[in-house]
Image (cartoon, rainbow, N blue to C red):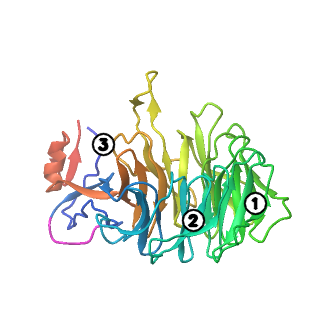
Amino acid sequence: MHVRSAAVTVFATALSLAVAACSSAAPSESPAAEGADALLVRTQCATTPFGSGLIKVDATNAYITGGGNIATCPTSGDCSSPTTLASISGTLWDMAIGGNNVYWSNADTIFACAKTGCGGKPTVLATHQIYAARIAADAANVYWLDYSPTAAIKSCPATGCNGAPTVLATNLFQPNGLMSDGTNVYWAASLGGQIWSCPVTGCNVSPTLFATSPAPWTNGIESLAFDANYIYFGANDPVDTNGIVARVPRGGGPITILANGQHVPSSIASDGVNVFWTQSGLLTAGGTDAPPGGSVMKCAVAGCNNAPTSLLSGDYGFPGGIAVDATSVYFGDSSGTQRLPKSLCYVQTCSTPIQCCAQNGGEWVNHRCIFQ
């Protein structure tokens, strides 16, 4: 006979543990004493609906799109009755928050509205742009990709630029994944695995090559994220079957791969402790979802031994548009925006270690669960 590590951990003595419910609040990392024998298993949590469309979050509020509007709601609630800030004119392409404002683009126009509202009359910052499909912001400026024949990065102060934005860089090769950390603007080349940077004050239209993803992961950098120490990105191999999530020091330096074997890691975010990303599901030859489905992944910024945690249970196909706050991860899928706790949930599977031992085919002998 031998003692086997079951799929759940069997506690050899009576423990007093509480069950942390799976909810939109972050579950405890370690259960608290409550005086009832229980066996707890850490597992994936259920998602809860949270608005629709794109989502950005700050310390207290979420900013969402849906129903032809830009709206806001406290993250402490369920966002079932958001406050409309402004109506969207035309087709929305992207949204960003920075400082006191919300920004968005409808392909050829850049709009701004205060987070507290603008009377339904957003400010027009720039017009006659070409396919402004990526937009980013910091406390001082808003930035966007203008996919004109020369593909440019443009900026405008939050206070306005009289319809004459500054061109930071031009003649770019398939730019994507725009972001700003308040000091520099960063973007990626969709092909080639390159990440470029330019000071927010300008670089005489001569950006700096900040980092290059190692071969074979030089395809499809779609999103960038940063925290106090690192810049993060996801990249794919040429056939989109073996992607990576990696980090680079903000001051420049070697690339560290946090996880490989990811399937099309796209949207990415960091809270300074962990990095989170979405990865797409697989498709069958007929174009339908095939296992495994899309997921939301998590890895410590210090590394996770190439074993990231999947926070999302079920087949969500192609989740994307990720955001994080102090307790939750937000992402979009075909049914709208979902909210998920940043940590795994504790689930009670049996009332006593003896019962759990029996449920898993063992025999309780001398305070231990024995398996034949």
Confirm whether residue 304 shows in the render. no
Q: Position of residue 40 (x, y in %)?
A: 25, 57
The kind of residue on which mark 1 rests is Ser
| Image height of 75 relative to 178, above or below | below
Q: What is the span of residues highlighted in magenta in the rendered image?
A: 31-36
Q: In terms of sequence position, does the residue under pointer 2 or pointer 3 come before the other?
A: 3
Q: In the shown orientation, is residue 369 left or right of residue 148? A: left
Q: Nearer the viewer, mark 2 or mark 3?
A: 2
| Residue indicated by mark 2 | 111
Mark 2 to mark 1 CA distance (whole Å): 24 Å
Residue lying farthest to the top in this orientation: 285
Badges 1 and 3: C-beta atoms under 8 Å apart?
no
Judge by depth and name the residue closer to the eye, 308 or 30.
Answer: 308
Relative vertical location of residue 172 with respect to residue 13 in this rendering, above or below: above
- Residue 32: say if magenta: yes
Q: How many other residues sit within 10 Å of disc 3, few (<14), some (14-19) or many (≥20)?
A: few
| Precedes in sequence: disc 2 or disc 1 | 2
Closer to the camera, 118 or 197? 118
The answer to whether residue 46 is left or right of residue 156 is left
Disc 3 target residue = 4
